[in-house]
Image (spheres, rainbow, N blue to C red):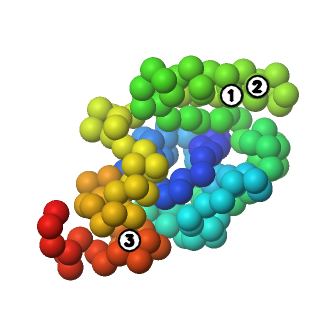
Amino acid sequence: MIAVYAGSFSPPTRGHLDIIRRASGMFDEVIVAVLSQREKRYRFPPEQRRSMLERITRELSNVRVICDEGLLVDVVRREGADVILRGLRNGSDLLFEMQLAEANRRIGGVETLFIGCLPEYSMISSTIVRDCASHGAPIESMVPEEISGEIYTAYGVSPAAERKGF
């Protein structure tokens, strides 16, 4: 069975990686789809997000990372996947994700499976990581070590080891 785990991943967090790791144990293949909306501006371009995800998932042999700008149901069809996989942090996520799941079922006939994140990741979001990094605050507990320096660099901030005050 093949699952597509899609998101903007701008940037990837420890919560994203946790969902990917756990899913890799449940599915034959997990395709991580870095999606971009043409009308949105991202701090990290799609190929950089893809590269970050490839580095943090390199130990997971059944995980593949792709980039796309289209509809998620089209990605699922093109990749021959069986289901969409979504991570949930809290009840607010559930309401929004249920709407998306119903839309994907109606327009593409694709089912969505949800995985609840571990409690230690429930308050982490890419938005919070971006805000902290842009102000030079510590992000090491929120993102995988392999990519924290790259995130700081995107904001013109030196890595935590070189900063004082935090």
- Say which quarter of the image contains residue 71: top right
Residue 149 location (% of width, % of height): 36, 73
Instruction: Report if the CB atoms under discs 1 and 2 are less than 8 Å apart.
Output: yes
Element under label 3?
helix
Q: Which residue is mark 2?
A: 103
Q: Nearer the viewer, residue 38 or 103?
A: 38
Q: Residues within 10 Å of mark 1 (few under 14, many from 20)?
A: few
**Residue drawn 83% across the image and 30% down it:** 108
Q: Determine the CA span between mark 2 and mark 3.
A: 36 Å
Q: Indicate the amino acid at tag 2.
A: Ala
Q: Which quadrant of the figure contains the C terminus?
A: bottom left
Q: Earlier in the sequence, mark 3 or mark 1?
A: 1
Looking at the rendered structure, which numbered label has been put on residue 69? none
Looking at the rendered structure, which numbered label has been put on residue 152? 3
Q: Residues within 10 Å of mark 2 (few under 14, many from 20)?
A: some
**Residue drawn 56% across the image and 65% down it:** 43
**Residue 54 at least partly seen:** no
Q: Determine the CA span between mark 1 and mark 2.
A: 5 Å
Residue 115 location (% of width, % of height): 48, 30
Q: Earlier in the sequence, mark 2 or mark 3?
A: 2
Instruction: Report if the CB atoms under discs 2 and 3 are less than 8 Å apart.
Output: no
Residue 28 location (% of width, % of height): 58, 44
Q: Nearer the viewer, residue 158 or 149?
A: 158
Q: Which residue is mark 1?
A: 100
Q: Indicate the amino acid at tag 1.
A: Leu
Residue 114 location (% of width, % of height): 53, 28
- Say which quarter of the image contains residue 22: top left
Element under label 2?
helix
